[in-house]
Amino acid sequence: MTDMYNTPAAGDKIKKPKLHPARMQKTPAHLNGAAELEKLCFSSPWSASSLELLTNDGIGVGYVLTVPAAPGAEPTVAAYGGMLITVDEGQITNVAVHPDHRRKGFGAAIVRALLRHAKDARLESVSLEVRASNTAAIELYKRAGFAEAGRRKGFYTKPTEDALVMVCKIK
């Protein structure tokens, strides 16, 4: 017998969890949970109040994946992603996955949700920046349909690093 995260016993079929990100809401559980993930994952994290931008229709959209917490407690945000929207383009701001939940499809589910939203909103394209050294994220984005479109020298700080600009054409 297996759970959704552990390696199956011999003869068991591997079952991938069905991950269904939810729209980020302007609630402490979502905003504070995403802000905590920001602190874990990024050297220049967004605050909970900054993340509110991703809950304003017409400006941005965010998606969260939660996992059960202790009995009686709110579920914990295990992954989130956000996108700002201008006219017919989307700009993914961040995709963050808690270290305990990496390599389990959480990031891919968030990216799919953002791209589905872009398609539903009839956006032409979605772009993002990613650290040039973040090979796991680059491969995830390539699998989702993004292609490298350029490089921003010294874009990131703490440490200083180039960003790859990636674009996914929606239409």
Image (spheres, rainbow, N blue to C red):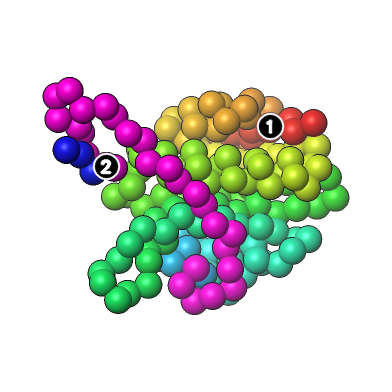
Residue count near mark 1 (Cα–Cα under 10 Å), binned few <14, some 14–19, many ≥20: many
- Per the rendered image, the range of residues in magenta is 4-30
For the point 17% across and 23% down, the residue is 11
Dividing the picture into quadrants, the one containing residue 82 is bottom right
Q: Report the predominant secondary structure element of the magenta stretch.
A: loop
For the point 80% across and 37% down, the residue is 124
Front residue of 106 and 155: 106
Residue 145 in the image: state x and y as whole percent.
62, 27
Type of the residue with mark 2:
Tyr
Q: Is residue 111 left or right of residue 118?
A: left
Type of the residue with mark 1:
Cys
Which residue in the protein does label 2 denote? 5
Residue 171 seen from this side: yes
* Mark 2 in CB contact with mark 1 (< 8 angstroms): no
- Is 43 magenta? The answer is no
Which residue in the protein does label 1 denote? 168
